[in-house]
Amino acid sequence: MRYAAQRLAQAIPVFFATTFLIYAMVFVLPGDPILALAGDKPVPEQVLAVMRARYHLDEPLLVQYGRYMLGVFQGDLGETFTGQPVSELLQDRWAVTAQLALTAWVFELVVGVGLGVLAGLRRGGAADTAVLAGTTFVIAVPVFVVGYTAQILLGLNLGLFPTAGTEEGWPVSYLLPGMVLGSFGLAYVARLTRTSLVENLRADYVRTATAKGLARRRVVGLHALRNSLIPVVTYLGVDFGNLMAGAVVTEGIFNLPGIGQQVFQSIQLQEGPVVVGVVTLLVMIFILANLAVDLLYGVLDPRIRRARA
């Protein structure tokens, strides 16, 4: 409990510092969002003053941030400059992106770790060479190329997956875009698992366990793989937030109405409250993921828990 409390205490200042930087960067950008609403039409100065006062744009930045955070702690992410609550705007879109990111994350975890173990146990063999070559290819190719190619080959030509939209629900509609979104992370997970496993298989404790007569499966699964997963858990914990934030291209290719699409539109319309609201939620996800990773460290290796507590 003390170890968990220390990790949580460290996360609190990180949350405030990160959200303040994001809020400041969004609202100090050039341009007036109130004028942007009117387009090319002239707006009386009195109307501009009333609108700026309504959305507290005439107040100092720290006061604006304080008001915003007070609302966040009450479950209110603010409202757009057209009067629509941000939480209501993101409600349906958030579920789409979360399901897409979860599908991609599970794909990375299962397939990436599996390929990494396969390559690590057959170091220097054909399986190892194939995994290294395949992951290098995936890392080198841009995600939009992978997306359009998969959409044409697996969706249109072979008919294995839906090509666009969410009509068939989760997981069917999210399988193909999830694999595309998770392909880049899968390559890193496979390589991390393979490298870490090869290193641990050479360790003294593995040789000792083998010399004691333990079965190969037990030596690899209980001892070597457990320690090998520490860097993999680190990457997977952070990558879930990356998947949530980086789904803009994939959502565009497969026509998924997620938050990535909404953020892109909000930036064009200078809807700062929407951008800040989305990023604030993503910051929370990153912090919670890192907290979960820290706690998993203690589970995978008790020495880390004792050293940090």
Image (cartoon, rainbow, N blue to C red):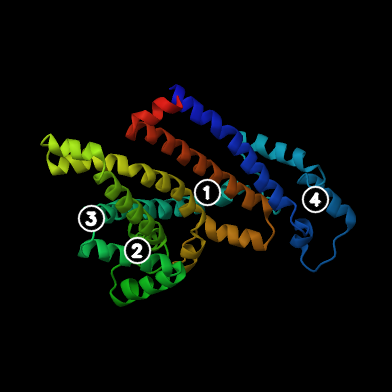
Give how far across and how far down residue 182 sits, in percent. Answer: 39, 58
Give how far across and how far down residue 175 sits, in percent. Answer: 34, 60
Disc with the residue nearer the chain's start (3 vs 4): 4
Spatial separation of the CA atoms under disc 4 and disc 2: 52 Å
Disc with the residue nearer the chain's start (3 vs 2): 3
Residue at 24% from the left image edge and 45% from the top image edge = 201
Q: Amino acid at mark 1?
A: Gln
Disc with the residue nearer the chain's start (4 vs 2): 4
Q: Which residue is mark 1?
A: 91
Query: Which label sits on residue 140?
Result: none
Q: Which residue is mark 4?
A: 51
Residue extending furthest front? 204
Give how far across and how far down residue 143 sits, in percent. Answer: 44, 67
Q: Nearer the viewer, mark 1 or mark 2?
A: 2
Residue at 66% from the left image edge and 37% from the top image edge = 69
Residue extending furthest top? 2
How crowded pointer 4 is (Cα within 10 Å; few <14, some 14-19, many 20+) is rated as some
- The answer to whether 254 is drawn above or below residue 88 in the figure is below
Disc with the residue nearer the chain's start (1 vs 2): 1
Query: Which label sits on residue 118?
Result: 3
Q: Is residue 142 left or right of residue 28?
A: left
Q: Amino acid at mark 2?
A: Thr
Spatial separation of the CA atoms under disc 1 and disc 3: 41 Å
Q: Is residue 58 visible?
A: yes
> Which quadrant of the structure image shows residue 37?
bottom right
Q: Which residue is mark 2?
A: 135
Q: Secondary structure at mark 2?
A: helix
Spatial separation of the CA atoms under disc 3 and disc 2: 13 Å
